[in-house]
């Protein structure tokens, strides 16, 4: 039996990107308004903002990776259960990330028009929707603990660990929703430095509890998810403070 080449997905992505770039170049040449040559200042601005977002993205991946590493030190059974719980949690929580896109679009558009009140309304509405959706996902995540682990394994110890992970991950769903929406809000504000700073500082809220789990293994998956919850809460608070300060500087109360 032949095994699939692990590099095939990577090559597929490269080919798709090359074809898309070629199609864009062809369409640009045929357009009556072809794109102009960017100025050096424009390129410098893109590189500066790209650097901020790159650091933020790298920092974003550090905590889930560290959580997996910590869980691996607890043993193969907690690790297997955590993988089931985390994958289900991530699949559900990332649905609220879709609210970050309209938050970014509407807030940047309203701020561009100089309508601060409309930008605050957009932020408030997306936050309310995110919080409501996050609470619903919390209930759904807890409900999955009743049957979902049995779909992945027949090992009773792994299933028990997965149930524990799902039940402890459920309360973090509203925090994840708020963190994702505030990401979109601050993107709409255009403050990439604040996004980078918030992501880096929030690691400090995760690290001490993760260290305690490494020291005291009996804390187990509840300890891991408490650390992840603190990470999400710290992100939310730091981004909220940035949005609140922008409202205060404009003479309005935060929405």
Image: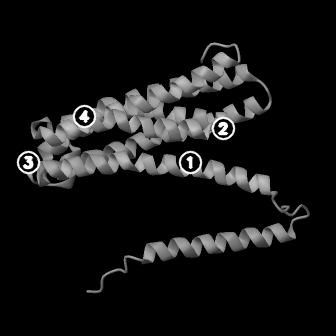
Q: Residues within 10 Å of mark 4 (few under 14, many from 20)?
A: many
Q: Tag 1, which secondary structure?
A: helix
**In the rendering, at what x and y percent does residue 43 appear?**
73, 56
Q: Do labels 2 and 3 touch, CB within 8 Å?
A: no
Residue 210: image quadrant is top left
**Relative to 233, is 14 on the left or the right?**
right
Mark 4 / mark 1, whichever is N-terminal: 1
Location of mark 1 (residue): 53
**In the rendering, at what x and y percent does residue 222 appear?**
19, 34
- Could you give the CA–CA distance between mark 4 and mark 1, rounded to whole angstroms? 26 Å
**In the rendering, at what x and y percent does residue 81 appear?**
18, 48
Location of mark 4 (residue): 209
Q: Is residue 163 above or below residue 253?
A: below
| Residue in the image at 45% along x and 72% along y | 9
Location of mark 3 (residue): 157
Residue 146 in view: no
Residue 243: image quadrant is top right
Mark 2 / mark 1, whichever is N-terminal: 1
The residue positioned farthest toward the bottom in the image shown: 1
- Could you give the CA–CA distance between mark 2 and mark 3, rounded to whole angstroms? 47 Å
Name the residue nearer the viewer: 208 or 169. 208
Q: Tag 2, which secondary structure?
A: loop
Name the residue nearer the viewer: 41 or 138. 41
Location of mark 2 (residue): 190
Name the residue nearer the viewer: 100 or 75. 75
């Amino acid at each position: 039996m032949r095994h699939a080449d692990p590099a095939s997905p990577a090559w597929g992505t490269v080919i798709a990107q090359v074809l898309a770039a070629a199609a864009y170049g062809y369409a640009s040449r045929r357009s009556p308004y072809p794109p102009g040559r960017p100025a050096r200042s424009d390129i410098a601005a893109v590189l500066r903002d790209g650097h901020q977002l790159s650091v933020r993205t790298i920092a974003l991946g550090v905590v889930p990776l560290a959580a997996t590493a910590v869980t691996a030190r607890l043993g193969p059974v907690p690790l297997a259960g955590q993988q089931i719980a985390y994958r289900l949690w991530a699949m559900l929580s990332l649905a609220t990330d879709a609210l970050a896109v309209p938050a970014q679009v509407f807030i940047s558009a309203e701020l561009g028009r100089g309508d601060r009140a409309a930008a605050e309304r957009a932020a408030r509405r997306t936050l309310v929707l995110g919080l409501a959706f996050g609470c619903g996902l919390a209930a759904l995540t807890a409900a999955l603990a009743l049957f979902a682990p049995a779909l992945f394994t027949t090992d009773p110890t792994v299933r028990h660990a997965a149930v524990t992970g799902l039940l402890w991950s459920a309360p973090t769903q509203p925090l994840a929703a708020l963190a994702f929406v505030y990401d979109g809000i601050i993107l709409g504000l255009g403050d990439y430095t604040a996004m980078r700073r918030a992501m880096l500082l929030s690691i400090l809220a995760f690290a001490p509890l993760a260290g305690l789990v490494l020291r005291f293994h009996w804390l187990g998956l509840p300890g891991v998810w408490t650390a992840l919850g603190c990470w999400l809460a710290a992100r939310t608070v730091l981004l909220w403070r940035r949005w609140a300060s922008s409202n205060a500087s404009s003479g309005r109360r935060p929405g």
